[in-house]
Image (cartoon, rainbow, N blue to C red):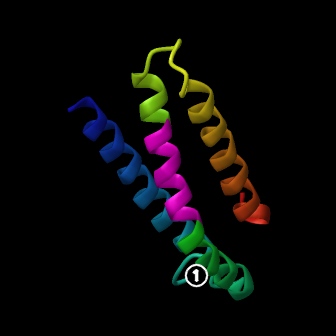
């Protein structure tokens, strides 16, 4: 239950920040003034979303496993690879 409350608060802050940013910038949607970056992000998301989901699953397995487990090193390696993959995919979008 606590996780839901935290994510709800994050979602509320995201919505507020987005609304205020659009009001300040005079834009109708995010990245309206930079369509090239908007297109690049849209093109990257289909590749980044699966990596994000995989990363979450690997972290769950790592936290739930026993530290002496043989697969522990493989899980850690997978986490590091997903971090590098997401980072490379975001490039200048951060």
Q: Residue at x 47, y 43 (%)?
A: 56
The answer to whether residue 31 is seen in the rendering is: no
Q: Position of residue 39 (x, y in %)?
A: 65, 85
**Is residue 54 on the magenta stretch?**
yes
49 to the left or right of 1: right
Does 32 sit above or below residue 2?
A: below
Q: Main secondary structure of the magenta part?
A: helix
66 to the left or right of 6: right
Q: Position of residue 21 (x, y in %)?
A: 56, 66
- Residue for badge 1: 27
**Is residue 52 on the magenta stretch?**
yes
Please tell me whether mark 1 sits on a helix, a strand or a loop.
Answer: loop
In this view, the residue in front, 59 or 34, is 59
Q: Residue at x 57, y 76 (%)?
A: 30
Q: Position of residue 84 (x, y in %)?
A: 73, 49
Does 7 sit above or below residue 45?
A: above
Q: Residue at x 66, y 55 (%)?
A: 86
What are the residue bounds of the magenta stretch?
48-58
The answer to whether residue 38 is seen in the rendering is: yes
66 to the left or right of 38: left
In this view, the residue in front, 82 or 93, is 82
Outermost residue on the left side: it is: 1
Bin the neighbour count of mark 1 within 10 Å (Cα to Cα): few under 14, some 14-19, many 20 and up: few
Outermost residue on the top side: it is: 68
Quadrant (top left, top right, bottom left, bottom right) of the N terminus = top left
């Amino acid at each position: 239950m606590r996780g839901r409350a935290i994510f709800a608060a994050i979602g509320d802050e995201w919505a507020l920040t987005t609304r205020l940013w659009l009001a300040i910038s005079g834009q109708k949607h995010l990245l309206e003034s930079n369509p090239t970056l908007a297109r690049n992000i849209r093109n990257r998301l289909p590749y980044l979303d699966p990596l994000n989901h995989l990363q979450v699953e690997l972290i769950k397995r790592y936290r739930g496993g026993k530290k002496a487990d043989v697969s522990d090193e493989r899980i850690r390696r997978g986490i590091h690879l997903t971090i590098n993959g997401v980072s490379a995919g975001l490039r200048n979008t951060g």
